Image (spheres, helix red, strand yellow):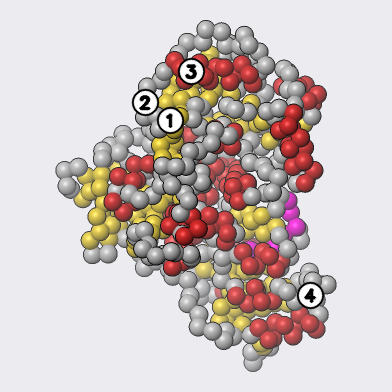
């Protein structure tokens, strides 16, 4: 492999069979030992691992990236957004040649093919697709169609507006790739708005049909667990506890649905376990009459400490400007400028990332984004007023184990409510849900009114917005995302709703990969589901923020 990657800025390898990872480890060792190695090595492998989907696994070296794709090879290749510089084919006996056509679409002129164990049909299909031996006998892809190489930025400088979870993750993922980033935050310190709660919980989402929100949440959750460990770990560098999360079934009918999910999706035990009533009740120490899901690797974290860890990891590539107040943006000579209230230029760069929640819509270029503010009040309850919990408990609300003498409970989900004050009615609502969770009408008697109010930024489909911002609503019926014109160099990381803890790392990684022309960390349909321009497509016109009222289901309410 080494002779082929020398002289390259980056090198992408596609492996048709992960096995036990031996080949990846050998290639990574060779890359580390080669003084003429490319600056970045990206290894993508088809893997028979669970749970299904694409999984990006952070490595100790930011210049080394590993993706595992758990899907049949032909399907995985059609959903992969990448260009391979080298392809390794093995372990394909008896699979026919259906993988060849999607494989050829991932190859570029000069892509090197290493193959073993292929049958005559597969070899013939590869030759027909354009893979042929050169004078040295190496199989090289020769494209018969025009090929546009990935765009590499001329200069790696960016401005990020907003120092909550979204903006802090954007800074870290760009700085990790060598970018110089200026962070502009209106408050005097990070995590002062939606990211300012004492605790947020992290857990996956399950569904019978393994739909797009479920798959996206799973990818984000698994990536976040690995990412936080690289930053120093939950409970160490990051305040929190990976103590597990128990999600109680709402009633007998809901429990039947959950049992069917457990049967249809045999998740690994460390990802999700369905517990019948006796098991759940024994673990909880109080009645759980309809059973529960246990997410052993879930837990809670203090968002501000996550932001601090991400910003600290940026090192001297980050210039943070706090206390900037209200800002505007303008474009001048191919650069974006952030302008203060007095009219002075605060920062300037060719790339601008809006990561400031619903405040982004105050900027004309983002004014048409269908984002809503949803009020969420969390109640703080003194340790000792509730039973000691071994894990986070949730259903219609969540309740964390005590930390520094305080349980966090909530949060309310108040659409169209702009009241920033902590109020008794919301506190009473949270307390009622806590008593229901614990099956104890007398829990937390006369709890004093203490807590915090924050405002989630929510899109109509309750998925994040991650990517380039479109210029304007098209006059005709737009059907393809790639046909929509975009503001040059203007991007958004917005709409994280109740899952900012886990959305932030993967969405930032997605955006950074797009900016660098790298393979993206999600299947193509999932990446498209996060495109900020999706609401402009003809088939998405039904998403009207006035008409769409976010439901109060547990998937969106439990992780304020």
Residue under numbered circle 3: 427
Q: Give the SS element for disc 3.
A: helix
Left or right, 486 with reference to 410: left
Q: Which is in the foreground here, disc 1 or disc 4?
A: 1
Check the image and name the residue furthest to the right.
94
Q: Give the SS element for disc 1.
A: strand
Residue 187 image-quadrant placement:
top left
Q: CA distance from mark 4 to mark 3?
A: 61 Å
Left or right, 554 with reference to 137: left
Left or right, 112 with reference to 378: right
Check the image and name the residue furthest to the bottom.
135
Residue under numbered circle 1: 375
Q: CA distance from mark 4 to mark 2?
A: 62 Å
Give the percent coordinates (x, y) of residue 84: 59, 72
The reply to whether dot 1 and dot 2 touch (C-beta < 8 Å) is: yes
Give the magenta range: 41-50
Residue under numbered circle 4: 96
Q: Give the SS element for disc 4.
A: loop
């Amino acid at each position: 492999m080494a002779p082929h990657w020398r002289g390259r800025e980056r090198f992408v390898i596609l492996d048709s069979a992960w096995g036990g990872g031996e080949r990846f480890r050998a290639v990574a060792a060779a890359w580390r030992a080669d003084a003429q190695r490319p600056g970045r090595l990206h290894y993508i492998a088809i893997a028979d691992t669970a749970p299904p989907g694409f999984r990006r696994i952070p490595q100790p070296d930011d210049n080394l990236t590993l993706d595992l794709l758990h899907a049949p090879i032909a399907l995985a290749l059609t959903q992969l957004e990448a260009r391979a510089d080298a392809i390794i084919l093995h372990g394909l006996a008896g699979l026919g040649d259906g993988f060849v056509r999607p494989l050829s679409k991932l190859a570029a002129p000069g892509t090197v093919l290493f193959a073993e164990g292929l049958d005559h049909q597969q070899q013939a299909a590869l030759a027909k697709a354009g893979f042929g031996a050169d004078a040295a006998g190496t199989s090289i892809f020769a494209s018969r169609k025009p090929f546009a190489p990935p765009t590499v930025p001329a200069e790696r400088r960016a401005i990020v507006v907003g120092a909550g979870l979204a903006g802090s993750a954007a800074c870290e993922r760009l700085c990790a790739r060598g970018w110089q980033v200026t962070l502009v935050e209106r408050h005097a310190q990070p995590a002062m708005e939606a990211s300012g709660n004492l605790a947020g919980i992290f857990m996956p989402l399950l569904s019978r049909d393994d739909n797009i929100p479920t798959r996206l949440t799973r990818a984000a959750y698994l990536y976040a667990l690995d990412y936080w460990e690289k930053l120093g770990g939950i409970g160490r560098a990051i305040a929190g506890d990976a103590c597990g999360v128990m999600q109680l079934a709402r009633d007998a009918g809901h429990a039947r649905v959950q049992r069917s999910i457990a049967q249809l999706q045999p998740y690994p035990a460390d990802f999700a376990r369905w517990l019948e009533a006796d098991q759940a009740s024994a673990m909880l120490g109080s009645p759980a009459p309809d059973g529960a899901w246990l997410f052993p690797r879930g837990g809670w974290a203090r968002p501000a400490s996550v932001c601090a860890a991400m910003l600290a990891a940026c090192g001297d590539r980050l210039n943070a400007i706090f206390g900037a107040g209200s800002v505007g943006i303008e474009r001048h000579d191919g650069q974006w400028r952030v302008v203060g209230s007095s009219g002075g230029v605060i920062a300037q760069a060719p790339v601008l990332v809006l990561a400031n929640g619903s405040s982004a819509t105050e900027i004309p270029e983002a004014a048409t984004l269908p984002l809503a503010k949803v009020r969420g009040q969390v109640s703080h309850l003194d340790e000792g007023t509730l039973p000691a919990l071994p894990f986070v408990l949730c259903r219609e609300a969540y309740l964390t184990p005590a930390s520094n003498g305080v349980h966090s409970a909530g949060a309310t989900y108040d659409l169209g409510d702009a009241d920033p004050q902590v109020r008794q009615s919301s506190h009473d609502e949270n307390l009622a849900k806590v008593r229901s969770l614990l099956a104890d009408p007398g829990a937390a008697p006369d709890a004093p009114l203490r807590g915090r109010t924050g405002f989630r930024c929510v899109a109509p489909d309750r998925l994040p917005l991650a990517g380039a911002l479109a210029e304007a609503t098209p006059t005709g019926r737009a059907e393809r995302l790639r046909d929509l014109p975009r503001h040059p160099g203007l991007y958004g990381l917005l709409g994280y709703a109740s899952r900012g803890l886990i959305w932030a790392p993967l969405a930032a990684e997605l955006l950074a990969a797009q900016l660098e022309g790298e393979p993206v960390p999600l299947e193509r349909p999932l990446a498209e589901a996060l495109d900020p321009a999706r609401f402009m497509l003809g088939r998405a016109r039904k998403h009207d923020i006035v008409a769409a009222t976010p439901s109060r289901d547990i998937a969106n309410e439990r992780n304020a």
